[in-house]
Each structure stands twice: as C-alpha cells, then as structure tokens.
Amino acid sequence: MAHHSLKLADRDAGGRTSARPGAALKALRMQRGWTLAEVSKRTDLPVSTLSKIENDRMSLSYDKLARISAGLGVDISQLFTPQVASMPGAVSGRRSFTAAGQGQEIDTENYGHIYPVADFLNKRFVPVIAELRKRTLAEFGEMIRHSGEEYAYVLEGTVEFHSELYAPLILRKGDSLYFDSGMAHAYLKAEAGPCRVLSICSGPESQLMEAVRRENPEKPKHGRTRKAKA
C-alpha cells in the first residue's frame, strides 16, 4: 500500500483499535487515481456521503461497506486492513483466530458493529456481531437492504425483527433466522437491557461479480477492539 501516511486505525493506551474504513477508502481511491465523483458512480453513493466517510464524519453500516467493496472491486476486509496481502485462492487449511469480544468495531446510530476476523481476506461470508440500540422503527429510520442472504442468531436479549414483506417477528436468546437480505430489514430491541445478534452475511463474491458486470459495456447492468461480555 503506497499511502502509509494515512491513519487506518486509532489506537489507545491499552492497544485497542477503532476501525477507520474512511481512511482505507481514501487510500484505495488515491492509489487508483479516482475522484470522489468516480467512486460515486461505482458505488451509487453521493459524493457528499463519500466525503463524510473519508473525513470520519459518518459511520458505515454493513450495507454501505458492501456497496463500497463491490464498487471498488476489493474484499470487504480491505476496508479495515488494506495493507494486508491477498491470500492465494487455492491454499487449503486457512484460518484466522479472533479472541472473545475482539474485532474491528464500527459504531452507527442503530447498531454497534464488531467485525471478527477482519484480517482474513476473500471470506465466503462476513460475520458481524451487532449490539442493537433502537426500540422502534421511527427511531431506526429507513430499513436497510444489501445483496446476498443473512443468518441471524440472538446472543443476548430479545429482538423484534422487521422486514418489508413479513409481519414483525420476536426472537429470543438462542432463536435464529435466515432470510434474503435484499429484502429491507431492521433489528430492534424488544426490551430494555443489552441485546446482541450474531449476523452472518453472504454476498461479497457475488457483489464483486456484479461490479465487474457493471463495468463491462457488453452486458447490462456494501473498529475498536473491546473485551467480551460474560
């Protein structure tokens, strides 16, 4: 990676890091000589939004990370650690260990996201641990959607799951759900107290394939580490 002067993470005295995908986005954009307008065309995100992301004035939810990953044609993990070398696709026995509660953390208004194994490139799916913050759809705002499919497992608390095609569903600790994540959806806290969900999202490879198709004129036309909770 050529632009080592760009900070990709903040580190505190305890050695904890906070993910800064905006810095990674800027480094990748500069490396390729692209303007914000060019990245906007590739990601379908407004220039004003991209500028806020690059200047750490906007947090990124998974759906925006996936759109940027697809538009730039990079693995989603490179938005956390763009200096990590790509792993050969044909190597067997790959592994990456994340200690309990560790991972790159990104905070948004609706969720606190922890991304485990953020250093592991070319994953077939992306695991995310989300701490839910909103109690109503009015507080949450517009539901999100992203390509692929999603599996959710309730780790703690009670979840009220909303989607555009189904009635709200209550999920309690140990309950799980698998759904088409192209369907607009939202996870809400159904009760007071901590509420966490393990979400496993598929799609990065298909998103990259779609990015390639969009660029082909012959064819028509997505943290800070912290200690684990007991």
Image: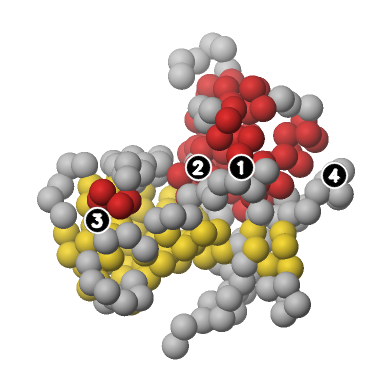
Task: Tell me whether circle 4 and circle 3 mark residues in contact (CB < 8 Å).
Answer: no
| Residue linked to disc 1 | 53
Marks 4 and 3, how far apart in space? 42 Å
Query: Image check: 22 left or right of 173?
Result: right
| Residue linked to disc 3 | 136
Local SS, label 4: loop
Local SS, label 3: loop
Q: Nearer the viewer, residue 138 or 16?
A: 138
Of the numbered discs in the image, which one, if any, rests on residue 130? none
> Where does residue 219 sit, x and y in percent of width and height?
50, 15
Query: Image check: 22 left or right of 123?
Result: right
| Residue linked to disc 4 | 3
* Residue depicted at 23% across the width and 72% down the height: 191
Bin the neighbour count of mark 1 within 10 Å (Cα to Cα): few under 14, some 14-19, many 20 and up: some
Q: Amino acid at mark 3?
A: Thr
Bin the neighbour count of mark 2 within 10 Å (Cα to Cα): few under 14, some 14-19, many 20 and up: some
